[in-house]
Image (cartoon, grey):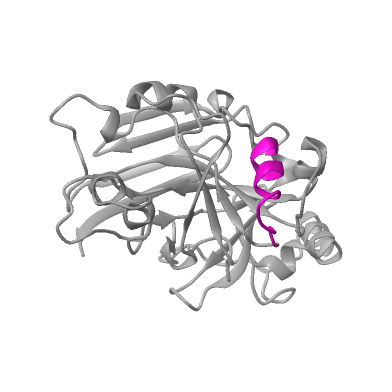
Amino acid sequence: MKLLRVGTAGAERPALLDAEGTLRDLSGFVTDIDGALLSDAGTLDRIRAAAGAGVLPALSAEGLRVGPPVGRIGKVVCIGLNYHDHARETGAEPPAEPVVFFKAADTVIGPDDTVLVPRKSVKTDWEVELAVVIGRTARYLESHEQALAHVAGYAVAHDVSEREFQIERGGTWDKGKNCETFNPLGPWLVTADEVPDPQALSLKLWVNGELKQDGTTAEQIFPVAEVVRYVSQFMTLYPGDVINTGTPAGVAMGQPEPKPYLRAGDVVELEIEGLGRQRQELKAA
């Protein structure tokens, strides 16, 4: 299934995109697409059956904002330097273990919402990423099979980053990763049954129509199953939590000087095979 949330920010309603591309209203079944739903197999099965029977009411998509596909996110866990080609372009050694950092849940916005370039920023960068959404509480998982069984689905994420804040201003990466609007998510949460191999997805990103990133999740140093298993050794993952799994080569930081960092007025578009497409216009904060 392709689950999504539509409407004004803070007042989104649950919806489903059916096989014919028609938007369907789910508010008769659930109040939101969130951890409570994603951990409720019975309700998900009833939604799937209703979608198959064609009984869900249609919604007009015209002029309707698409919000992030998951509401009430508890935490956003991120994995850095998780693609061989990205490590090479930045001159970094591939890590021996996953590099883990966090984004605050309030950085998450809709896939086509405005991204704000922070004040005094000169190095705002782009990163297309595969997001994993957790569907079952995960603690100390022992195998890759267990890890994948705890995944509710997948989505497109844009891990916007301010490199000066991240790398040159001291401390950890947090200052460059948690600026407002720095995590567009969506348009859909595609349930795990529709993604048989998360290591066989193409990722692309364009800036002002120019292709900048063209990669594949096959390049991941630590695949999705290992990321979920590994992270569960250090923290409890709850339904509705999100893991951003890293970005392929092609970011501004890895380009020759003068590096083409983002500015107000730029347009970024990104997509992942089968998971949908995003488009953001950048404005000054």
Confirm whether the magenta stretch covers residue 235.
Answer: yes
Residue 89 visible in this rendered orientation of the protein: yes
Q: Which residue appears at 54% of the width and 41% of the height?
A: 245
Q: Nearer the viewer, residue 45 or 221?
A: 221
Quadrant holding the C terminus: bottom left
Q: Nearer the viewer, residue 241 or 100?
A: 100
Q: Is residue 27 left or right of residue 47?
A: left
Q: Nearer the viewer, residue 233 or 87?
A: 233
Residue 183 spot, x, y in % from top left: 42, 55
Residue 192 spot, x, y in % from top left: 72, 45
Residue 222 spot, x, y in % from top left: 60, 31
Q: Is residue 214 left or right of residue 257?
A: right
Q: Is residue 187 above or below residue 258?
A: below
Residue 85 image-quadrant placement: top left
Residue 210 visible in this rendered orientation of the protein: no
Q: What stretch of residues is rendered in magenta?
A: 225-238
Q: Residue furthest front?
A: 171
Confirm whether the magenta stretch covers residue 154.
Answer: no
Q: Which residue appears at 58% of the width and 50% of the height?
A: 243
**Total number of numbered discs in the rendering:** 0
Q: Residue furthest right?
A: 42
Q: Is residue 281 above or below residue 36?
A: above
Q: Which residue appears at 80% of the width and 38% of the height?
A: 143
Residue 62 spot, x, y in % from top left: 44, 63
